[in-house]
Amino acid sequence: QVQLVESGGGSVQAGGSLRLSCAASGRTFSWYAMGWFRQAPGKERELAAAISNNGGRTAYADSVKGRFTISRDNAKNMVYLQMNSLKPEDTAVYYCARHGSSGNPYMAVREYIYWGQGTQVTVSS
């Protein structure tokens, strides 16, 4: 069973930065694409960023392009989300997720198989 554990969430003022981390269990981490998703109260879960299995390809939601950076370290079974220039509308629970395939930064929520428990990010104005 794959386990994903997020950390690094917290409260920050608008314009600030946070770095989210996701630790994954298992020896096949490097085989699969990964994603960071977020869900605000009363809203559907949405993609923030995704990364291919080898880190060579990434994709971002338009709302975070230029501010967020996704990366991964396959040697450590870790995926990261660096969030800069945070805005109040970035407030949400952020989830790490693992896809079932490898070569692309997949963007569809429904295609992700394993999910972490989430970490809260709160941005105040």
Image (cartoon, grey):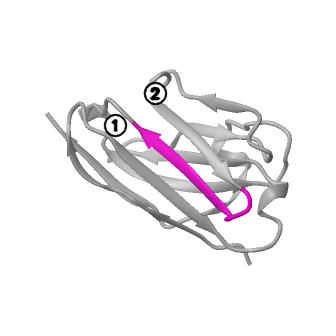
The magenta region covers 74-83
**Residue 106 x %, y %:** 73, 38
- Judged left or right of residue 118, residue 125 is left
Kindly indicate whether the residue at mark 2 contacts the one at mark 1 (C-beta within 8 angstroms): yes
Q: Quadrant of residue 67?
A: top left
The label shown at residue 90 is: 1
Q: Residue at x 50, y 23 (%)?
A: 65
Is 77 a magenta residue? yes
Q: Is residue 44 visible?
A: no
Q: Is residue 8 visible?
A: yes
Q: Residue at x 30, y 42 (%)?
A: 91
The kind of residue on which mark 2 rests is Val
Viewport quadrant of the C terminus: top left
When the figure is inspected, residue 3 is found, relative to residue 53, above or below; the finding is below
Q: Residue at x 68, y 38 (%)?
A: 108
When the figure is inspected, residue 109 is found, relative to residue 113, above or below; the finding is above
Q: Residues within 10 Å of mark 1 (few under 14, many from 20)?
A: many
When the figure is inspected, residue 92 is found, relative to residue 88, above or below; the finding is below
**Residue 35 x %, y %:** 63, 46
Mark 2 secondary-structure assignment = loop
The kind of residue on which mark 1 rests is Asp
- Judged left or right of residue 111, residue 118 is left
Q: Residues within 10 Å of mark 2 (few under 14, many from 20)?
A: some
Viewport quadrant of the N terminus: bottom right
Is 106 a magenta residue? no
What is the chief secondary structure element of the magenta stretch?
A: strand
Residue marked by disc 2 = 64
* Residue sticking out furthest to the left: 125
- Judged left or right of residue 75, residue 65 is left
